[in-house]
Image (cartoon, rainbow, N blue to C red):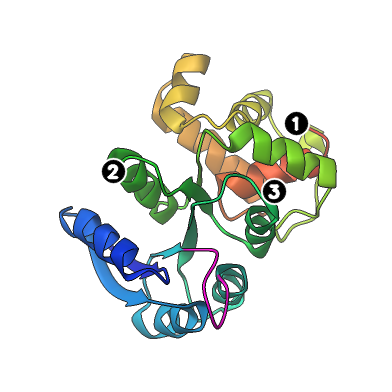
Amino acid sequence: MIRVLIADDQAVVRAGLAVILGAEDDIEVVGEASDGEEAVGLARELQPDVVCMDIRMPVVDGISATRAIVADPAVQADVLVLTTFDVDDDVFAALEAGAAGFLLKGADEATLLGAIRSVAAGEGTLDQRLTRRILHEFSARRAAPVARAEPGDAHDLTARELDVLRLLAEGLSNAEIAGRLFVEPTTVKYHLAGLLQKTGSRDRLQVVLWGIHAGIVAP
């Protein structure tokens, strides 16, 4: 069961998400927060697997709340940012704060549910409508990646891991990468696990940021 905490200052948004998520057999909404401070406190108290985090909230904003949740060793939750705003400074700040995924609030239900399951599985996610623009802008800014390890040598990665990394940078899912490389999705997961271990990354999004910072991929 995937335990989800919803953090949004709009009650109607929280209610809508709770209805959608609550209808799924493998997802349980364990709490709702109306501001970032409450989200941090509930994340510690309820120990969700995923926090669906709005960016613009009162008291403590979603960026600061994301940073606090990711940095807290007592909290194992990953953060999925749900934003109304197309790429802006807040999105990049949340990325640097350690968010595991981004999704526009206009996404359909299937995309939302897939994103939550992907984040819960440790794979992270990035709305494909934002992928190239976010990665291009992030590359231009040359911000430090959120991965804990320092960028290593590209020669440490196998040829297939490099293939997977470049396709991750295009915003492709595991299934799409498998189709592009003519391999099984389980094979993609194997190479992704190798990338996570070698780069010290938490999820696929951080792997891509590592690749940009190391000069291996260029959006």
The secondary structure type at the circle numbered 3 is helix
Residue 139 pos. (x, y %):
79, 40
Q: Nearer the viewer, residue 131 or 182?
A: 131
Q: Are marks 3 and 2 in contact (CB under 8 Å)?
A: no
Provide the residue designation for mark 2: 109
Q: Amino acid at mark 2?
A: Glu
Q: Nearer the viewer, mark 3 or mark 2?
A: 2
Gap between marks 1 and 3 measured at Cα: 14 Å
Q: Is residue 123 visible?
A: no
Disc ID at residue 199 = 3
The residue lying at 35 percent from left, 46 percent from top is: 112
Provide the residue designation for mark 1: 217
Question: Which residues are drawn in magenta?
Answer: 54-61
The residue lying at 74 percent from left, 53 percent from top is: 145
Q: Amino acid at mark 3?
A: Thr
Q: Amino acid at mark 1?
A: Val
Gap between marks 3 and 2 measured at Cα: 32 Å
User: In which quadrant of the rendered view does residue 48 lie?
Assistant: bottom left
In the picture shown, does residue 60 fall above or below 131? below
Identify the mark nearer the N-term, 3 or 2: 2
Residue 138 pos. (x, y %):
75, 44
Gap between marks 2 and 1 measured at Cα: 31 Å
The residue lying at 69 percent from left, 39 percent from top is: 135
User: In which quadrant of the rendered view does residue 179 lie?
Assistant: top left
